[in-house]
Image (cartoon, rainbow, N blue to C red):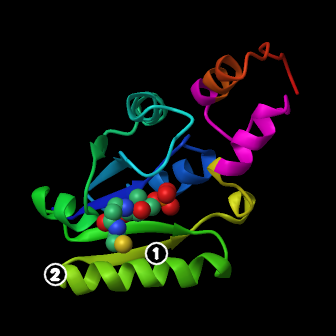
Amino acid sequence: MIVAIYPGSFDPITNGHLDVIDRARKIFDRVIVAVLRNPHKVPLFTVEERKLMIEEAVRDLPNVEVEVFDGLLVHFARSKGCRIILRGLRAISDYEYETQIALINRKMAPEIETVFLPTSTEYSYLNSTVVKEIARFGGCVRGLVPPGVERRLREKFGLPMVKGR
Ligand code: PNS
């Protein structure tokens, strides 16, 4: 049974994250999406909201589950008996930061490997920050995030729901 942990802030989850999750669940027996409760950042969505939005989006994916963690990722991975950390790579610019984190994690927990999965090209420009920026100023995020996230972004920013684009 190979379990992979897919960690992140997911503030909020995007279709780019979902693309990685959907491909990973075909490679690994179980994928645990691990939502970071980060005391150093003020997120747009609470960790409970972020978890709920991911749960809605992965409802039909039987080998995917969602958990919240705090502290070190490698401690959480160990507590789950998991030896694989999964990260999506959008562009070469992600590589430097991701490699640094992977090496730090390996230093702390040599038995845990980090696996990078390239994001599909159609999502290579996408991240949670741009999604929030678009929504904040009334732009349309349809196709960039799951429907439940689109709805909550509109609620957060007090925008009406739109039909079509
Ligand atoms: O979605 P993000 O914000 O790029 O995810 C970053 C995340 C959650 C993977 C990373 O910040 C993390 O693992 N944080 C937990 C603390 C930790 O273990 N840090 C690694 C050593 S610096």
- Which residue is disc 1 drawn over? 116
Mark 2 surroundings within 10 Å by alpha-carbon count, few (fewer than 14), some (14 through 19), many (20 or more): few
2 lies left or right of 155: left
Q: Is residue 89 above or below residue 125?
A: below
Q: Is 133 positioned to the left or the right of 67 in the image?
A: right
Is residue 160 left or right of 40 when viewed as pictured?
Answer: right
The magenta-colored residue range is 129-149
Q: Quadrant of the C terminus?
A: top right
Question: What is the distance, in whole Å, between disc 2 and disc 1 at their CAs?
Answer: 16 Å
Picture residue at 27% right of the left edge, 70% below the top: 84
Give the vertical position of 13 relative to 147 (above or below).
Answer: below
Q: x, y (%) of residue 102?
A: 38, 80
Tag 2's secondary structure?
loop
Q: Which comes before the other along the chain, label 2 or label 1?
A: 2
**Which residue is disc 2 drawn over?**
111
Q: Residue at x 71, y 43 (%)?
A: 131
Furthest toward the front, the residue is 40
Q: Quadrant of the N terminus?
A: bottom left
The amino acid beneath tag 1 is Phe
Front residue of 18/8: it is 8
153 falls in the magenta region = no
Residue 3 in the image, given as x and y percentages of width and height: 23, 60
Q: Residue at x 28, y 42 (%)?
A: 67
Element at label 1: strand
Identified at 70% across, 40% down, the residue is 132
Q: Is residue 143 above or below residue 102?
A: above
Residue 27 visible here: no
Question: What's under tag 2, amino acid-wise?
Answer: Glu
Observer-nearest of 135 and 125? 135
Q: Residues within 10 Å of mark 1 (few under 14, many from 20)?
A: some
